[in-house]
Image (cartoon, grey):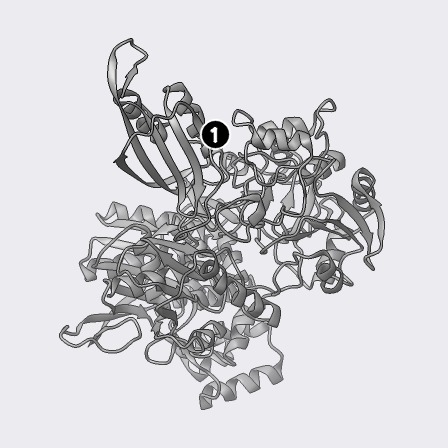
Amino acid sequence: MLKQSAAGSQSFVQRKRVQIQGAVQGVGFRPFVFRIAKEEQLAGWVMNDVSGCLIEVEGAATNLEQFVVRLQRDAPPHARVLSIEISDIASRGESEFIIKASDGAGEKSALMLPDLAICDDCRRELLDPGDRRYRYPFINCTNCGPRFSIINDLPYDRANTTMKPFEMCDACRAEYEGPADRRFHAQPNACPSCGPQVAFWDEAGRETAQREEAVQQCVNALREGGVVAVKGLGGFHLMVDAKNDDAVQRLRQRKRREQKPLAVMTPSMEAIQEFCFVSVEEEALLCSCEAPIVLLKQRENTNLASSLAPGNPCLGVMLPYTPLHCILLDDFAAPLVATSGNLTDEPICTNEYEAVERLRGIADFFLVHNRPITRYVDDSVVRVVAGETMFLRRARGYAPLPLPCTGSGKTVLALGAHFKNTVAINRNGLAFVSQHIGDLETLSAHEAFHEMAKTFQRAYDLQPDEAVCDLHPDYLSSRYAQGLNLPVLQVQHHYAHAAACMAEHNLDGPVLALSWDGTGLGTDGSIWGGEFLLCDWSGFHRAAHLRTFPLPSGDNAVKEPRRTALGLLYELWGDPAFERRDLACLKSFKENEIAMLRQMLNKNLNCPRTSSMGRLFDAFSSLLGLRQSVSFEGQGAMELEWAMGDYQSDAAFSFEIQNTEPSAWLAPDGAVMQGREAAPAYRVDWGPLIEEAISSLRDGMTVAETAARFHNTIIEMALAVAQRAGVERVALTGGCFQNAYLTERALKRLQQEGFTAYRHLQLPPNDGGLSYGQLAIALRRS
């Protein structure tokens, strides 16, 4: 068969089948294929299938070549092409190019997309009085709107989403079926005539208004200082006027969130710049399609409520990312608190009837809608560190896009740890890491964890061959793994942290991991956390660790840094530590408390030992008089970072590196590896640091300088161990590296001394990345 080419020459017609895998559903990929096929004068078809996107196309060879080039070069902005397989097939003599209905048969491997913030085109239409979707809270197109939060099954078609009950009107149907339209196959497509609607309820769940009147009642309630639970994209927000300190305090009391910072949603970038400093990188994050909460440095003397982030120089800020939020913020014309719609330690509410029950006594009113949410998705939280994004919480906008994960062909379900839990599973060289689930402290949190453990299995028809969990047997995630009737691999906590960073950067061993956090069960049964691990994919060697110290009352010491500080001093001085009543930590205790703690420490009763770097930060915060008890995890360490302010210094306190007995190489579960010789090991002694710091404070050194020297000393400890380990690559991992100063200075100092330092860029350094590390170990060790 011959075809006349655009240039007028004769050429043989060829036909090719193109299978594309990746995030190519719900991003306008088929209209894009349709358009370039037409422009290249090609015939055939394109459709969604369970693997992604399948194309058959025929025409002149030169046109086909250009078509393939453009597929990869010009793909829609939100598409993520992972692979393209091209094969030659017999020509069919077709004369036009069409878009076919989706095929739901076969092995599922198409990617579920994250929810996307409202795009500029939809925002313009939303605020245009002449547009038929003017002020419609559910406007969307192929470039924005809900995805992960509404998907029930693959492929991503309307019938497989929570939009199925909403029958499109003729106008919406014409857009949906028009290949040249921006809403072609936008699965949540709707308008005021045929789509979801909002309603306003009182605290008992009684409806008082619908549609536009509902929005106006919500705005009025917020202006009057009310707490409104607003159903958004992946769940509810609790919202109040961010300038009304009484309203903010009332929300804190009801939510049982005493001091933890509250996020703020603002009408515009200009509004943000009134009360925060914003860098170019931070502005790009705020305005991105992911639209995360971004930690920004606050300006002084703003008119925001002082109780938003007590004592914190930073504030978590986001722009409106749904059309409903855009309408609310446009009408309110001032910042609103937008914190998760839950009680502390519980998952956010997703169902309006559930919200009325669970948020009873917290919310005065409810702004709800009738588009169901399949799964809850919290807001992502990021900060810019050393010019790049650092995740503190990876959720909306980013999850569940996969990360690379090479290794054996088996399917592994990784269950994470107990705090900041995520779960992960693999398929075809990709790791699917869930959105942030949270701390498994409550029954509802555990139920949410169970559901997410099954989500990807259902979505991709996966049957795990193995489960992997933390070494701690009492974590709920570990118990869940043991009940799955599967082989279970237990992985030491800090090795999983190291593996997560190694897998992100595709590193093989050896790597020295600075695995620093608050708590993780060590292979010796003690509490680790200040670990210097020499790692490869077969196992790890504890090359060094912080000098251990007792934690009086165990978990209570985590809540009271003063107890940790006392344990530190007792390790240093013994019983005479109790006579140092000039120190801030001892001043904070009553006499009977001191007597009890003295007895506990002298008799070693309920005083577990730890090498935790997080607890060392807590103790130092107490010694400086910054924080004697905490209302949320990491508060003491955070205030120690804030205490430096803008103080700049390279000075450090002293410390010692002491040789210990050579230690064995350990398998992921802590078993001694046979055939590998024991290696040199060291103890990092913080004693001189504490002695000098206390002396310097007594001699008049400022808190800011003392805090800066403490941070500098910790980094010099890392450098000293790295030099002894003799390994060029160093990974920074664990919750301590959420500290921007610590991370930036560590990167700088290690690079200055010839090391290559790696940090997390796609996952949080905290326990939110553990499931990915566990998964990588399970796959690569095989």
Q: Quadrant of residue 300?
A: top right
- Give how far across and how far down residue 23 sits, in percent: 43, 42
Task: Classify the position of the N terminus by image quarter.
Answer: top left
Residue in view at x 27 percent, y 68 percent: 544
Q: Which percent across, then down, holds residue 305?
A: 71, 47
Left or right of residue 206, residue 640 in this image: left
Q: Name the quadrant containing residue 251.
A: bottom right
Within 10 angstroms of label 1, few (less than 14), some, or many (20 or more) residues? Answer: many
Residue in view at x 31 percent, y 53 percent: 429
Q: Quadrant of residue 560?
A: bottom right
Is residue 572 among the parts visible in the rendering?
no
Q: Report the amino acid beneath label 1.
A: Pro
Give the answer, above or below, for where 205 lies relative to 544.
above
Who's the residue at 41% across and 61% down the image?
462
- Quick one: which residue is furthest to the bottom in this view? 603
Whole-percent x, y for residue 561 in the image: 53, 69
Q: Is residue 40 visible?
A: yes
Q: Residue furthest top?
A: 8
Query: Is 400 above or below relative to 298?
Result: below
Residue at horizontal 55%, vertical 63%? 625
Indicate the quadrant containing the C terminus: top left, top right, bottom left or bottom right: bottom left
User: Which residue is at the front of the view, 362 or 171?
Assistant: 171
Residue occupied by mark 1: 31
In depth, the one of 320 and 688 nearer the eye is 320
- Give how far across and how far down residue 691 sits, in percent: 39, 68
Q: Is residue 652 left or right of residue 454?
A: left
